[in-house]
Structures are given as C-alpha cells and as structure tokens.
Image (cartoon, rainbow, N blue to C red):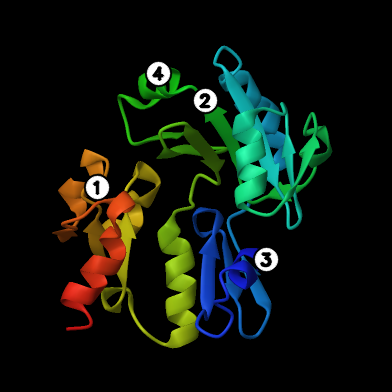
C-alpha cells in the first residue's frame, strides 16, 4: 500500500496480488484476502535445506522485513518495499502462518539447485525461483493462479479473460492457466507454455509495449 502511494497510483489500481498468490488486496475497499499460507513450523526445515549455501533468509510482514543477516541484498529488499529492516533469527514465526520465506542465494548455487526442475516440492512447502538470486518457499499448493482466480471471482470473470506476464519459474502456472505472455528474457520454461512472447524485455518496457501494440490499438 505504501508503494502504491509512492507511485501516485491510488486512483487507478483496483487489486494487487502478492506473495505468489497467497494475498489479494482489494485496494479500493481496503480489504485483504489470504489463502494457502505457509506454516511457520517448516521454517527450520527450510533453513536446514539451504544451510550449505551462501544465503540470507527473509520474512516480510506488513511494515518490516525480518532477515537473518543484514547485507546489501537484504537492505535492497527493505528499501524497495519501504519496510523497516530487522535482524531476526525468525524463531518467532515458527508457530505462525506466513506468506512466504524468501532466501537470497548466490546465483551459481541457485543455478545448481534449480537446474533439474522448475520447482522443489515437498508435502510441507514448495520452492520456486523468482529471479537470479531469489528462491521463494511457499505453501505446496500455492501458485500465482490462486490469487488471479480470487480476483476473477470478485470480478465475475473467468481465467480465459485474463492476460498474465511473467519471466521466471514462479510465473509458470499463471502463464499456463491464463492467456500467458512470456517476457523476451524469460526463463525458457515459460516460453514453452506461453501463448505470446514480448518483443522487448523487462528492461525495455516489454509489458507496456505489448499492451500498447495488442490491447490498446
């Protein structure tokens, strides 16, 4: 909500889907919908899984980012999201429901971890990559489609009336389940499922140019 204000976009945003689909904000009505949250009791299992990697773990709540290390990488997350940065062993979350646990991991180690499958799934959690250094641990049944489906329910429309844009493996389900558009620089897993591929990448207004060319003409 703080980001929306900083963008001066209060009058043009209706819904925001966050945390890989587990949280939906009806911005105009100031109402949150949450589903498929992650049980905090699995946090120690996740930290055990990544213990041999160079990582920082992050759990965000509404106003703060709780991190296992304060580094340039965790400082950047807090700055980008207008959150207070708090050094934390995360044990306070073991008996709570959380939206996700983010691990920031060196690219080479994350490449090795994710090379064999788009996601790492256990009965307790799923790990999906969201950029070159981010591995997000979420509820095993969660995908961005969950959040999109909730917005469709609120609007009275179906998934085939939704266009989604994505670039990483955590976008795979929504690209598959809607009219999916992969970014030019997307993970190849997405381009295989997408109905369209943008002419321009993330750093050259790929989404905006696609919308202008195909939706607003």
Relative depth, front residue between 14 and 146: 14
Identify residue for label 3.
2
Identify residue for label 1.
190
Answer with mark 1 or mark 3, whichever residue precedes in sequence: 3
Answer with mark 1 or mark 2, whichever residue precedes in sequence: 2
User: Of tags 4 and 1, which is closer to the observer?
Assistant: 4
Tell me residue 112's x, y (percent).
37, 18
Answer with mark 2 or mark 3, whichever residue precedes in sequence: 3
Tell me residue 68's x, y (percent).
72, 28
Identify residue for label 2.
105
Q: Quadrant of residue 50?
A: top right
Secondary structure at numbered mark 3: helix
The residue depicted at 68 percent of the width and 54 percent of the height is 82
Distance from label 3 to label 4 (Cα)? 33 Å
Answer with mark 4 or mark 1, whichever residue precedes in sequence: 4
Identify residue for label 4.
108
């Amino acid at each position: 909500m703080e980001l929306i204000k900083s963008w001066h976009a209060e009058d043009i945003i209706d819904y925001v889907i966050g945390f890989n689909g587990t949280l939906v904000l009806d911005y105009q009505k100031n109402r949150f919908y949450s589903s498929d949250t992650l049980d905090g009791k699995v946090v120690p299992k996740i930290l055990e899984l990544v213990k041999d990697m160079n990582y920082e773990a992050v759990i965000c709540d509404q106003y703060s980012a709780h991190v296992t290390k304060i580094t340039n990488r965790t400082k950047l997350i807090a700055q980008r999201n207008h959150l207070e940065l708090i050094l934390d062993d995360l044990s306070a979350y073991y008996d709570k429901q959380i939206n996700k646990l983010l691990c920031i991991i060196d690219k080479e180690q994350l490449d090795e971890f994710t090379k064999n499958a788009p996601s790492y799934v256990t009965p307790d959690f799923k790990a999906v990559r969201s950029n070159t250094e981010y591995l997000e641990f979420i509820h095993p049944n969660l995908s961005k489609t969950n959040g999109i489906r909730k917005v469709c329910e609120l609007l009275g429309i179906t998934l085939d009336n939704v266009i989604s844009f994505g670039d990483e493996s955590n976008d795979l389900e929504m690209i598959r389940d809607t009219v999916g558009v992969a970014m030019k620089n997307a993970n190849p897993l997405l381009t295989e499922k997408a109905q369209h591929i943008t002419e321009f990448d993330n750093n050259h207004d790929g989404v905006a140019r696609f919308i202008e060319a195909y939706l607003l003409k």
